[in-house]
Image (cartoon, rainbow, N blue to C red):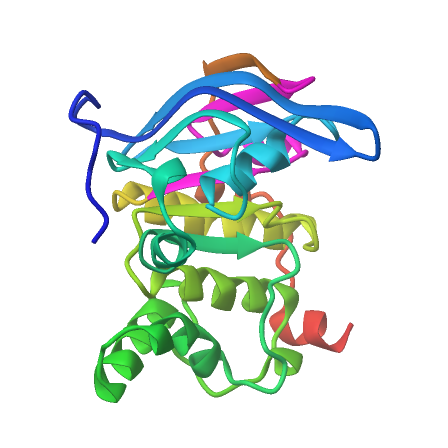
Amino acid sequence: MIQQTVPTIQNGQLIVVEHLVKIYRLGEVDVHALRGVSVSIDRGEFVAIMGASGSGKSTFMNILGCLDTSTKGKYFLEGIDVGSLTRDELAMIRNKKIGFVFQGFNLLSRTSALENVELPLLYSTVSNNERYQRAVEALKRVGLEGRLHHYPNQLSGGQQQRVAIARALVNDPSIILADEPTGNLDSRTSVEVMEIFQQLNDQGITVVLVTHEPDIAQFAKRQIVFRDGKIRSDKPTPQRKRAAEVLKDLPVIDDEEEEAA
């Protein structure tokens, strides 16, 4: 059983990273992806991670998602020293505590929206009925209750990303990690997706997203900018945008027109 090992973590802190270093070995060359990163993220925050290609932001996100490990330093998630976990324990953390949303949606093409959302629950002990009910509820939360049995090729890009968000929600994770979640979407659909993230965050869900788009980062509450493997700035978002207000000034794209395109 995974034990919480760091009683000194302050109340409200979900993620604590201390002096994180990541070095990749490419041939005979050491590549320093992270150079002593220290940061904390509280429950209920909405954080945008920014930076140019090679800045370290993707490496940082992979470590937060327990998809990679650091060379040096510590990473605590809900008081758990992630670096001390076994492979099976890391898999459990990924399944139970972290919801992932990717740029490419990562949906199974021959599987309905409902079945795609049910997938994370196949590794748990919940009954078939509970799995179904939780998947339906997750799809309702992203406005897709009428598309339960549609396949990905029957859905627009925005709808596919909503399915991916529902899949990330179905296990009631501690945090949602979104890697360029609007990278494959048009301008209005991108804002619609950010509206969903803002709504979920307003409900108390912690959201951390990687983006290279300053306009998208404006929807987060806080912006952390990486450069050369270090955090160069970490500030509240000035004049934060509300997606619902921005949408009022954007032209509507009909879902069926988008699907046909």
Q: As displayed, is residue 127 above or below residue 166?
A: below
Nearest the viewer among 98 and 223 is 98
Q: Residue at x 34, y 54 (%)?
A: 89
Whole-percent x, y for residue 230 in the image? 60, 16
Whole-percent x, y for residue 218 in the image? 54, 29
From the image, which quarter does the N terminus lie in? bottom left
Left or right of 52, for residue 9: left
Q: Is residue 207 magenta?
A: yes
Q: Is residue 48 visible?
A: yes
Q: Residue at x 62, y 71 (%)?
A: 255
Left or right of 259, for residue 218: left
Q: As displayed, is residue 112 above or below residue 94?
A: below
Q: Residue at x 64, y 54 (%)?
A: 103
State the residue lying farthest toward the top: 232
- Tell me which segment is drawn in magenta: 206-229
Whole-percent x, y for residue 227 in the image? 67, 18
Q: Residue at x 64, y 53 (%)?
A: 251
Q: Is residue 24 magenta?
A: no
